[in-house]
Image (cartoon, grey):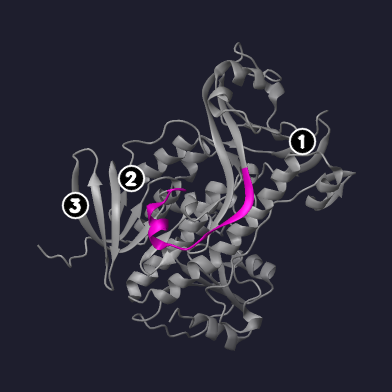
Amino acid sequence: MDVNRIDFDVVIVGCGPTGATLANLLGICGVNVLILEKENKIYPLPRAVHFDDEVMRVFQTIGIAEELEKKTHVNPGMRFVDNQDNVLLNWPRPTTTGKHGWNPSYRFHQPDLEELLRERLSQQKTVTMQSEQEVISVKENEEFISVLVRDLGRNKVRSINTKFVVGCDGARSIVRTLIGGEVEDLGFRERWLVVDVLLKKEMPELGDFTIQYCDSERPMTYCRSPKNRRRWEIMLLDGEANSEMMLPEKVWSFLGRWIDKNDADLERSAVYTFESRLSQRWRRGRMMIAGDSAHLMPPFMGQGMCAGIRDATNLAWKLSVALKTKEFNGILDTYQSERSSNVRTYIETAIRLGQLINTHDPKGVLEISENKNGGLATMRSIYPILGEGVGSTLPDNMIHHRGLIVSQPKLMDSVYFDDKYGYNHIFISRVAVDINRSKDTQEPFVFITTQNESSLEELLNDLGTNAVLIRPDRHIIGTASSVKEIELLGSFSYH
């Protein structure tokens, strides 16, 4: 037996939304992937309930967006109200498609998403998934990593060799432990009772908006989920035992303001400790972490799962480049530097919202709002750019938009941009220039001129430039105006 054999290019530990998304994107890149999942089936009850248009765009790339959309509810926004139901802060979300080609906010049932992701995985020729697999240890050398795995179904242990390991194994990640490094506590920790119900009848009076009931004594949240699903989240106080708060009679006493046993069935109740944590080390050598393994945030923005999906789409193409070029330190160093600051912005904003929910202080409302609309404090969605990383070494005048995600226009043939050009590097230019790219040392680009695709003129106009280089995850590497700059951007390399 060859102990130095390489069984897979990438082993992913955990097949939740982050791990399954990463595996699907790597499959699109033709990477040989093994997913090791400890559980034997998808967890059947609700967990995450929200994602946004950026994330739906990733699902579009994978090929599940149309089916997933049928199972979602478009979220019109969130309102923060006081004890008398007066609106303190309004966060409206358009119910029409936006710049990414999708609605800005969706409510969903997580098992629906996971089923679609796994169905798509089964169609990926280079991806293998194995359930009931527990990772015991991970040992790294210069050329590969050995993963010791216990098959829980057969109680057998085996060793798997791989070039890279990515831990998508949650808050108690074994991979994060092996990577080491401190976990920064950003100061938020609260226990909340999460209750999911199935309505027995139509109850339009509950409304479609997410409602945050700001109360210094007992904050609560109401979420309108797809079909007859509804969720309430109730903050627990010091001294209240989890087991007591989860008793059906206690749960119904909390929900009595809105519904009773005649209106709905309890699907589940669970106590979660909402935390704000950010790992200080996302990678060591050939090992990386993503999703909840790398960060935790309060749920008040609905961005916890979204952040994990963004990790996956950032990392997938970089692993593909590293495998093709056999030089991984440079490109993979940009993973944490780009994603960590982006996640931190979401965490800090979610903490501010959580602090607002715990009070009805008008001053706090004004501090978190961006403007007043007819006397009403309103909030807009945030779109933080990536941190320092790919493209940062380009001249200053070429990186004004570096780290921004580009919009998704419809093209002349009414096909969306991402559907036509795929999960690739894309170079768009107003002028055709002669650019020589080495097939051996440089990642291939899809070159498009606006002479052949005039519908992209508006994209360049919005950026105020004559050319743009876009990564597979739709973020901008750089822009160019002069012919000289266009030639420089066209010759961009990661080495």
* Residue 249 visible at all: yes
Spatial separation of the CA atoms under disc 1 and disc 2: 41 Å
Dot 1 or dot 2, earlier in sequence: 2
Q: Residue type at mark 3?
A: Arg
Secondary structure under tag 2 reads loop
Does residue 85 appear to the left or right of 407 in the view shown?
right
Q: Point out the tag, 1 or 3, that comes first from the N-terminus.
A: 3
| Badge 2: residue crowd in 10 Å (few <14, some 14–19, many ≥20) | many
- Residue 88 at x, y = what percent? 82, 39
Picture quadrant where residue 242 is located = top right
Which quarter of the figure has residue 215?
top right
Q: Residue at x 48, y 56 (%)?
A: 419
Secondary structure of residue under mark 3: strand
Which one is in front, 491 or 429? 491
The residue at the far bottom in this view is 484
Q: Which residue is mark 2?
A: 37
Q: Position of residue 168 (x, y in %)?
A: 41, 52
Evaluate if marks 2 and 3 touch, with contact meaning CB atoms under 8 Å apart: no
- Numbered badge on residue 216: 1
Q: Name the one closer to the observer, 77 or 147.
A: 147
Q: Give the residue pinned by disc 3.
A: 158
Point out the frontmost of discs 2 and 3. Answer: 3
Q: Amino acid at mark 1?
A: Ser
Cα distance in 3D space between marks 1 and 3? 53 Å
Looking at the rendered image, the disc whose residue lies closer to the viewer, 1 or 3, is: 1
